[in-house]
Image (cartoon, rainbow, N blue to C red):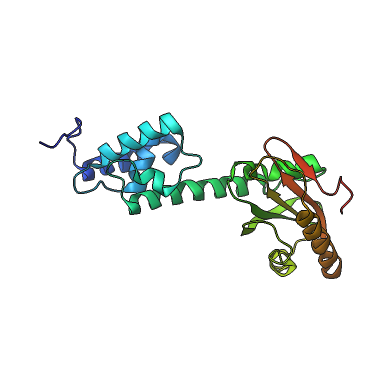
Amino acid sequence: MQMTFGFTRKDTEVIKETQEKLYSADRGVQELNDGELIQLILGSGEKSHSLEELVSRLLSHKNNYGFKDLAPQELMGIEGITERKAEQIIAAIELGRRVYHVEKVVGERIGSPHDAANVFQELKYYNQEHFVAAFLNTKNVVIAKKTIFVGSLNASIVHPRELFHEAVKRSAASVIVAHGHPSGDPTPSREDIEVTKRLKEAGQIMGIEVLDHIIIGNPGYISLKEKGYL
């Protein structure tokens, strides 16, 4: 005998109610609770699991373990969560993280290595190295931010072409680059120093100054400018 877990509403009824709240609330999507947001992301349940069942299980997982470092395989271990549902959730979480951290810093003026480090604080949470650039105007105000590549830092991989192509597209006067050390230790490696020198030289040729290279640890950071490499 199949258990119903007390959920009797059809998926269409659940979604309709949440949509009505989305469009009628004064603050729109901000008025929705976590469960309602997940409902909109998933859109429907599965053959033997209603939408409300899946949302309940996901919220239970969130309360116990959080959603910050979820892997698709972890979600697929929850009864009723298919590979496709797991992909939807992971993509939504990552998109939200990227939008938040990019839009939060655009318009910020960078006056010190500490200011620069604040622009890249999300890097401390990644389990893999991300090489990210902030593009600045002539007043040292951030006009854009972009992940250049993901993976271990290597002088042969981090080619100046990609960085300065993005800088030219945005008419940037200068750039600040950063990457995180998943180990938590921000001490620069030999490769970090070689990449920094290579980018500095390319920037001098392009007329776009590399103001700093920030290595984000957890906790703490190191500015290669302060260390004398720029």
Q: Residue furthest right?
A: 228
- Residue 158 position within the rendered picture, expressed as x and y whole percent measured from the top left: 70, 63
| Residue 23 visible in the snapshot | no
Q: How many marks?
A: 0
Tell me the residue at 72%/70% (across/down). 161
The one nearer the camera, 144 or 163, is 163
Residue 122 lies, in percent from the top left, at 62, 43
Kindly identify the residue that appears in the image at 85 percent across and 65 percent down. Answer: 201
Q: Answer left or right for 10 relative to 33.
A: left
Q: Does residue 76 appear anywhere in the picture? A: yes
Where 125 sits versus 208, above or below? Answer: above
Residue found at x 78% / y 39%: 114
| Residue drawn at 80 percent across, 57 percent down | 196
| Quarter that holds the N terminus | top left
Name which quarter of the figure residue 135 lies in: bottom right
- Side (left or right) of 183 relative to 96: right
* Depth check, front residue: 102 or 184: 184
Residue at the left extreme, as displayed:
1
Side of 75 where 1 appears, left or right: left
Name the spot of residue 27 as percent of width and height, x first: 45, 37
Residue 78 location, quadrant: top left
Q: Position of 31 compared to 8: left or right? A: right
* Residue 77, horizontal then vertical, whole percent: 34, 43
The answer to which quarter of the image holds residue 84 is bottom left
| Residue closest to the far front | 190
Judge whether 168 appears above or below 115 on screen.
Answer: below
Quadrant of the frame with the C terminus: bottom right
